[in-house]
Amino acid sequence: MGGNTFMDIGLGHYLAVSAILFALGLIVVMTRRNAIGILMGLELLLNAAGINFVAFNRFSAPERMDGQIFVIFIVILAAAEAATALALVLNIYHQIHTANVDEAHLLKQ
Amino acid sequence: MMFFALSKQAGQIAVTNADVQEKFPGLVQEITSNLGAFLPELILAVGVMWVIMADLFTRRERSRRMGFHAFAFVAVALVSVICHGFSGDQELFRGMIVDDGFGAFFKVLLLVGTLICIPMVMMTRSFDGRRMGEFYGLLLGSVLGMFLMVTAKNMIMFFLGIEFASYTSYLLTGYLKGDRRGAEGALKYVIYGSVASGAMAYGLSLLYGLTGSLDMADVAQGLIVSRTTDVTVLIAGLLCFAGFGYKIAAFPMHFWSPDVYEGAPIPFTAFLSVISKAAGFAVLLRFAEGMVGTGNWELTLSNGDVVGVDWPLVVGVISALTMTVGNFAALFQRNLKRLLAYSSIAHAGYLLMGIAALAPGAENAIPGWQAILFYLVAYLFMNLGAFLVVSIIAEKTGRETLDAYRGLGSRSALLSVALGIFLISLIGLPPTGGFTGKVQLIKAVVDDGQIWLALVAVVNTVVSVYYYARIIRLMFLEESDDTSKVPLSAPVSAFVVLMIVPVLWLGVFFGSTVDFIRDLTLTLG
Amino acid sequence: MLLTLVTFIPLIAALVVLCIPKEQKDIIKWTSMGAAVVTFIISCQLIMGYRSGGTDSVAEKFDGQIQSVIDDNVADTALKASFQKGVQAIEADNVDDAVGADRGPVHYAEVAGIDLKSLDAAQSKAWHETWELSMAKGAAASEHIRFVEFGHWIDGFNIRYFMGGDGLSLPLIWLTALLSVLCLAYSWNITKATKAYFALFLILETGLMGVFLALDFFLFYVFWEIVLLPMYFLIGFWGGPRRIYASIKFFIYTLVGSVLMLICMLALYFHNGFDTFNILTLMEAAPGFSQTMQMWMFFGLFIAFAIKVPIFPFHTWLPDAHVQAPTAASVILAGVLLKMGGYGIFRFNLGLCPDAMTGAIQLPMWLGGNFIMFMAILGVINIVYGALCAMAQKDFKSMVAYSSISHMGYVLLGLAAMTDAGVQGAVLQMFNHGLSSAMMFLIVGVIYERAHHRNLNKFGGIGAQMPYYTGLATIGFFASLGLPGLNGFISEALVFMGAWNSHTASPAVGVFGLPTWIVFLALPGIVLTAAYILWAVQRVFMGPLKSETYKTFKDLSFREVFVLAPLGLLCIVFGVWPQLILGFMNDTLNTLVSSVIAVAGN
């Protein structure tokens, strides 16, 4: 598609971005102690998958819209997930007055 | 340039009304004609709304009656599934879901399990004085989500199904709002579950990229054609497996389950350990079977090279680790709910053997998926039976720890004998369904030539005896200071007996069930 | 029909007992006793029938079954003829001892000109069953099986309800029935949870009968496991102070063995497309198994059975279980349960791994070089080590328990000899040990009930106090010691004769012969046995009364005489007239040996 650098952005770049996003998401999930922080990491994971879907749709299988549709669902699911998870975080916050998951240790490891 | 690319694509997206007519003639008729096969799902969907709405018009102290409503809806759905039959072989809604015997079998399994769980919920006193409409609404919703899981053919559908079933499960785990254990369990569940589904979404996107389609059959087919390195396929597969693995609580995605099982209300723990797991296996099976069906499980070229990833080995290793981790962790548990949680991890490991042996060598042998289906039937009754007794004991004594079972043999013969039978079945000794099921699983792997896995399984069986037999020992061989009889009402006794019958039946006359499973249709597209 | 009755009458009685209210102890006891007596009578009938019956009726039964399978499923006359041709081909090979040949259903379909792919589902099932039965018929004839019962259980996996009695199993059936009656009589004064006790005992009897009679591997396995649970509860609930430890140890050891057996069973099922659990069919096909296959089968099955026998180094569960078990459970444990292991080795290891039994399969030197040496060495270790341990025991019951280990070593040594005398001696030793060890455990039980301890060093002078008891006890002890005129002597002598003769007789027919030094290594066992038994007799019965309380001991009650006297009598009868039981086993055992020799000949 031409020779300028702008045009050279291809599938690989998108995949790289999404992989970095996925890795960041995993790091956040694993290192954060605050439940809200973990939920933010989860959003990164889902968005990494979303970028992949769009990019693959564009570059590998442009004839059908499957990937784009999947992304729409991912966005909706992410919203639903956040609502569900926040409700549960709120529930535990009422009881132990913190959203730090380390404090939730009543159940044996 | 980016903008150019997008606008170019936008041109493709712009679809007019006329296009719909042109591209999809008779779409509306097609959808309505497919609704017949979708009736059970519709019944459940109506049920979800009904119990929530009806509950609004019920006084709080009568709210537990919603259980009857939910029970009725599940029963009607069950009847409609059975009436529809097990010989369907078609795609519905343009390949989103399929209508086949395999799906119908799992629907029946899920519904029967739910029918057993609902009375357990109604017997639980910790729910007293709460609004139960939401609980049953979520429960039915969860089953509905699982229906979509077990029949999904398109990855969008099946991702949606998994998430639907999961979100409802998170909420149900934390349903007892004042209960800190439940709240903690739910929090852990939602965090682990979301990470798993995030990973799975990423894995699915890679599969999509590798094959350019979201249809499972196409994915399986595409994986053969694609010339990608094994590593990419392996990573995509393992990421997807994270999602399945979390549903079935397989190593290394099992960490959530003991905490969640211990924190959740007992009837829902039972639900999670059996029904949710069965649904997880259904998707995993359909996914894997799709790959086997198209020969990608282990494609050997004429020159002897194995193309693609050696999935039987990968699954076999996961299976071995899962059962070993589950059994060894169960050895040290004092809380029976937690013990059963670990035991159900171990059972997921046994079941995974069937997936490792999906494509057996000999002609007349049982393929792994049939063994899994049979084991799930047996597991449904034995594990729910065990949870039923645990739930009755917890109601009567208020304890879930092993101490509550000391001397139970002299306090309630029925409960102790019943639990004994369920545990013997869980160990896998004749004459119970657990034995015949496990024999079939081991048979499948032996036939597939994976003797090492069979050996791991039998060693695990021996290990598991130690903790199962400890409960039997406590009940029958030790005496407790409390010798008061445990009173049981007649319906509850009948309920317990009803759970024993299938466990023993499957142990002695399992032929008809095996034949039934053999004749199921499996549509892979 | 008799086989089914003898197996399931106890189970039905157990179910009846479970329905009787637990206060009605007498009804419970008499129902159980009635069932056990009926079972015993039927087992006697089986024995009588065996002596008078011929093998022809069994062959006819097989023929009839094969014919009906073909007639029911195959309509086409041409196909029918090919089926018949296949049957004839199989029967010809049965007689021919077709060693090393492929004897799978696919092979014979080719021979008979049947195109398996063109058959429909019912027809290919029918062909499989025709093959299975024709093969089994061959083995049934050479095994001298005189009673069979055949039915379909789980068709999907070709699992049959297939029972049969031959010279190997029927003596053990009779022993089981006899000991069950005596044990129930001995257990008359059990007061703790009487109902459960008697019900479990009856279930145990069903399991034992089933193990000895089942000729379908799957069925065998189911019965094998059924034995496990009642015994676990009998030890665990009615046992001594350390009963819980002992019972779980028993349970886990046995389960390790049985899961190994399960794997072997499935491997056999899938071997060469056999798809059958029929033991006779597998035996008939066994000479065709590869040596590697036979080696692994032998190891798997041998360990499974060795744990039950128990053979060193798998024996450690036995002293614990015996010492803790209630007397009647010990009697059944020593008298019959250990024989399950011995029976299994004869039925499966001998029948399914002929190359191993000729010594043709090479093993590493540290395992003895071949399976015959392997078994002989383990047998000698059992004999000597068991006797040494028995001598070191202070506890009366654990002395008897170790003596069991020692005595079961003879079974292994006799089998390893692979001569007629050795093998007969081995099986006879199982039977005799069933009588004498049962008697010894009862003797211990009687004195324990009175003294409430079992410390050998604290007894003394009982002889004068309880003369009848002492008389009967002496018979039991001397039978166990192997005194001429009592049963133990015959079997041990046969084993030694067989083993001694082995190095000349066996190589002549191509079987590995035991070196003579093995016999010399085992001989100290006899001396040691005499030593610990005489020493025990001396400490318990001779000398002055060691405690004033012993003066209050009453001699045997009627019930105890009823239990002990028949056993004592049988020890004498089989001691002076061993042919009574030997003549009974000869046919079966000699063909077992000659079938192995036939393999060696090729």
Image (cartoon, coloured by chain):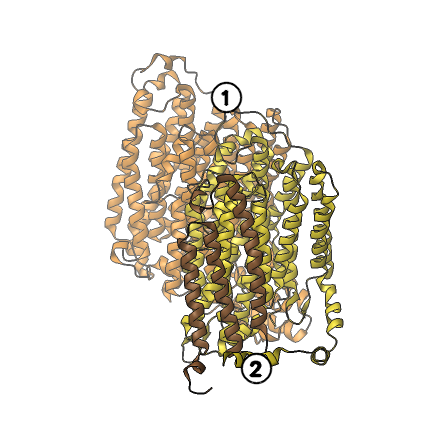
Chain colours: A brown, B yellow, C orange
Q: Position of residue A45 (x, y in %)?
A: 47, 62
Q: Position of residue A57 (x, y in %)?
A: 53, 75
Q: Which residue is mark 1?
A: C558
Q: Does dot 2 land on a helix, a strand or a loop?
A: helix
Q: Say if B325 sits above or below B517 in the image.
A: above
**Could you tell me which chain the residue with mark 1 belongs to?**
C
Residue B8 numbered mark, or none: 2
Q: Say if C188 sits above or below C125 in the image.
A: above
Residue B301 location, quadrant: bottom left
Note whether residue C484 is visible: no
In the displayed structure image, the side of residue A93 where residue C291 appears, left or right: left
Q: Nearer the viewer, residue B77 or B142?
A: B142
Q: Disc 1 marks which amino acid?
A: Phe
Q: Disc 2 marks which amino acid?
A: Lys
Q: Nearer the viewer, residue B158 or C511?
A: B158
In the displayed structure image, the side of residue B304 where residue B282 appears, left or right: right
Q: Does dot 1 land on a helix, a strand or a loop?
A: helix
Residue B272 numbered mark, or none: none
Q: Position of residue A77 (x, y in %)?
A: 57, 60
In the displayed structure image, the side of residue C532 where residue C196 appears, left or right: right
Residue drawn at 48 percent across, 70 percent down: B206
Residue B309 location, quadrant: bottom left
